[in-house]
């Protein structure tokens, strides 16, 4: 098994627990805890924002961009980190199927943005997640 990292919200304590899959299989006792009830599992994307904060599926990311609708101006966009599997529509000009993490938001035609580009070129930062802060993207 690989060492993929996850986080999940403990329904009992209402705190996030961070672990690898192997640690999860060992149970809460291996972590020095008596019990927990995990909800909202989120896989680590293996990416970090401009402040070196780990990015997980379900996080809400904010990044720099331009609004060309009226007058070109700088704006901050927000989107949810999602995993996309076999999504050819993301890049219709290619015959490739895309698997990986993207930012889902409503302003682009496809509704998705390449998360790597947002991190590398657009000052992306984690501002919350869809479980604790859904209002940030509504």
Image (cartoon, grey):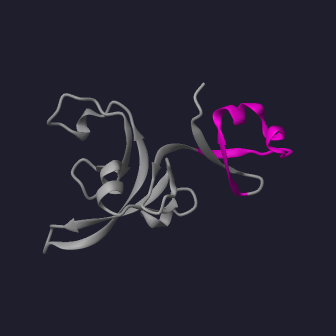
| Residue 100 shown left or right of residue 88 in the figure | right
Question: Quick one: 134 or 98, which is closer to the camera?
Answer: 98
Q: Position of residue 32 (x, y in %)?
A: 84, 45
Does the magenta segment cover residue 19? yes
Q: Residue at x 64, y 34 (%)?
A: 21
Q: Residue furthest right?
A: 34
Tell me which corner region of the image, top left, top right, bottom left or bottom right, holds residue 74.
bottom left
Q: Residue at x 64, y 38 (%)?
A: 20
Does the magenta segment cover residue 89? no
98 vs 123: above or below: above
Q: Confirm whether residue 105 shows in the render.
A: no
111 vs 60: above or below: above
Q: Position of residue 111 (x, y in %)?
A: 28, 50
105 vs 96: above or below: below
Q: Residue at x 44, y 57 (%)?
A: 49
Q: Residue at x 35, y 50 (%)?
A: 115
Quadrant in which the C terminus is drawn:
bottom left
| Residue 123 shown left or right of residue 74 in the figure | right
Q: Position of residue 95 (x, y in %)?
A: 19, 28
Q: Residue furthest top?
A: 1
Quadrant in which the N terminus is drawn:
top right
How many badges with numbers are in the image? 0
| Residue 94 shown left or right of residue 31 in the figure | left
Q: Position of residue 25 (x, y in %)?
A: 72, 31
The residue range painted magenta reads: 14-41
Tell me which corner region of the image, top left, top right, bottom left or bottom right, holds residue 63.
bottom left
Q: Confirm whether residue 59 shows in the render.
A: yes
């Amino acid at each position: 098994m690989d060492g993929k990292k996850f986080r999940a919200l403990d329904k009992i304590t209402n705190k996030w627990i961070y672990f690898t899959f192997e640690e999860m299989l060992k149970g809460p006792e291996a972590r020095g805890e008596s019990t927990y009830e995990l909800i909202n599992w989120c896989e680590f994307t293996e990416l970090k924002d401009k402040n070196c904060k780990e990015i997980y599926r379900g996080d809400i990311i904010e990044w720099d961009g331009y609004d060309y609708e009226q007058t070109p101006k700088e704006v901050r966009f927000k989107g949810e980190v999602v995993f996309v599997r076999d999504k050819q529509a993301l890049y219709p000009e290619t015959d490739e199927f895309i698997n990986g993490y993207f930012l889902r938001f409503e302003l682009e035609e496809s509704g998705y943005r390449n998360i790597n580009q947002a991190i590398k070129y657009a000052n992306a930062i984690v501002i919350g997640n869809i479980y604790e802060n859904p209002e940030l993207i509504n």
